[in-house]
Image (spheres, helix red, strand yellow):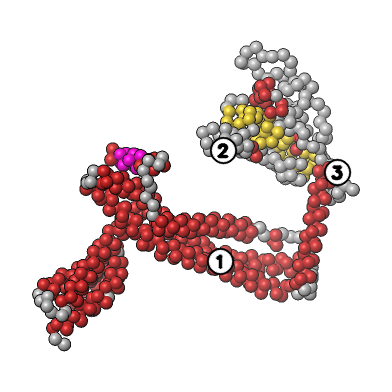
Amino acid sequence: MDYENYQYYCCNLFLKFQEELERVYKVYCATYDQALLLVETYRKEPELQREIQSVIEAAVPQAGPSGLSFLLVIPLQRITKYPLLLQKILENTLPADSAYPTIQRAASALQDVTTNINEYKRRKELASKYNKVEQLTLRERLARINTHTLSKKTTRLSQLLKQEAGLVPRTEDKEFDDLEERFHLVSLCVTELKSNVAAYLDNLEAFLRFRPQDCDLDMAEGPVVQYRSLTQDLHLQAFPEFKQRLEGLVWKPLCNLARALVGPQNLIKKRLDKLLDFERVEEKLLEVGSVTYEEEAARHTYQALNSLLVAELPQFNQLAVQWLGQILRTFMALQRDLAQQVLQRAEGSLAQLPHSQVSEPAFKKLVEETLGQNGNQLQSFQENFGKVLPPPTIQPLLPGAERQVEALLSRHGPGKLYQVTSNISGMGTMDLTLLRGQIVALLQDKDTKGNSSRWLVDTGGHRGYVPAGRLERYHVAPREEGLGGYKGSCDDTQCLMPEPTPAPASTLPTITQVVAVYPFVARSSHEVGVQAGQAVTILEAHDKKGNPEWSLVDVNGQRGYVPSSFLARPPSPAPWGWNLPS
């Protein structure tokens, strides 16, 4: 092969592998600095460093003591020398030679390759800069504020307001908008799935803590024995193994995927800021015709960031969807494996259980009929139970709330009083923070926007909005002499509540067994919480001041006060095993 043909052949090789060279060297050059940092960590481990050095000396003796660093820098030197060598060959080739056009195209192609590699490296460094998440204290954040940052943020805000007002046009980028929308959909799916899997794991943990098979049911034979044996086996091995696999194969990959979304999210947010800078610079360029060096740098920063996102977001979205799909398939496979394990372990016990010989359709029908009968019995029980209970027309005053209720009554009347059913944490400036059981007066049953789910109330000291669903009408307990049991009025601000009227005879006898009609949550050490339907022993049908609205009770060995109106006798003399009224 003569020299001219050799030149032609070599240049054709560069043209043939141009795209592959660019693709490989882009990644290599962009991650070269990270590779050097990794080499530095290797040098901190003498044994590992000696092993690496011995391998390099055996394979590449000319590397010398520099070792791995010498090998890593060689590709960088070569990719920068290729355009120079081709340009030198072109300069020493006559234009009339047949290989001249090919050499010219190869030199131009390699120059484009190095330019694209440098641009890609710059974009990656830019992305790395904006992807860094710094944990700064408030003082450190305030220390970073200066006139430059304030001016930059003020300019961006001004540009955004002008766009919202329609004074200046907004830059449209349909390609990026579609990619961003798809990314946000993927991000939303990941967030929702992570929340659902977290709830699933919490419920699984609660299920594993509940171990009814460990209870002594005093049944030595029958289906209960097979059930206990099977559930003990499942709780010891199958369910814990399923939980461990679920955490390792579903939860951890899902958390990693959620963390992988943080980088693109930061870049998309930063792109919006840089877009505002870019639009401002473009306006100035049209008006003045020139921009400063800093403004030109801001312009290039947006272009680089936007190009990077447009080039890599499609790949990221595709990989994220594949990752998400694999997680879902793994979750379904784990569920299927668990079902198979349970069926295999239960195979020996199923034959000893009732209805084991019933066909599957017949068994499903039997279950549906049984559940329907039990549902009807439960509904009938609830209806009949409600008939034998006193209606909740009177609610007790909370301890220490008499003066507040008296003030609200005198100002708004009894028809406007409501009681807070659960704690309320105010989030807005006009929202109130209230405790469960607090009494308020309704001022307006909607807010300023006409929203009927937020009510304006008066607590006696503050006014604000609360959720309407957290309030229920408060029925004032009637007394012989009115609220507080006194006559006349107070002449000064030091007036205290007068002596309470003598407590009437309690309708509930001392030391009696009753049931709680409504749930009650203790708010102090003097009270005790009860659940609806729970058996309660009344020790004293009044408090220490003789007030019959509070009763001293014993609940599973705990003593405390509960509202008397929350208690009722069962319709049978016996506290347990009473039947439904006919």
| Residue 294 included in the magenta stretch of the image | no
Please provide percent x and percent y for residue 31: 30, 64
Question: Compared with residue 52, is residue 511 higher up or lower down, i.e. above or below?
Answer: above
Q: Quadrant of the N terminus?
A: bottom left
Please provide percent x and percent y for residue 340: 64, 72
Q: Left or right? Give the position of 350 relative to 56.
A: right
Q: What number is the disc on residue 457?
A: none
Range covered by the magenta-colored residues: 149-158
Q: Amino acid at mark 1?
A: Phe
Q: Residues within 10 Å of mark 1 (few under 14, many from 20)?
A: some
Q: Amino acid at mark 2?
A: Ser
Please provide percent x and percent y for residue 266: 39, 52
**Residue located at (20% from left, 81% from top):** 9
Please provide percent x and percent y for residue 213: 70, 62
Residue matched to label 3:
571
CA distance for labels 1 and 3: 51 Å
Q: Left or right? Give the position of 322 relative to 372.
A: left
**Residue located at (62% from left, 38% from top):** 453
Residue matched to label 1:
331
Q: Quadrant of residue 232?
A: bottom right
**Nearest to N terminus: mark 2 or mark 3:** 2
Q: Amino acid at mark 3?
A: Pro
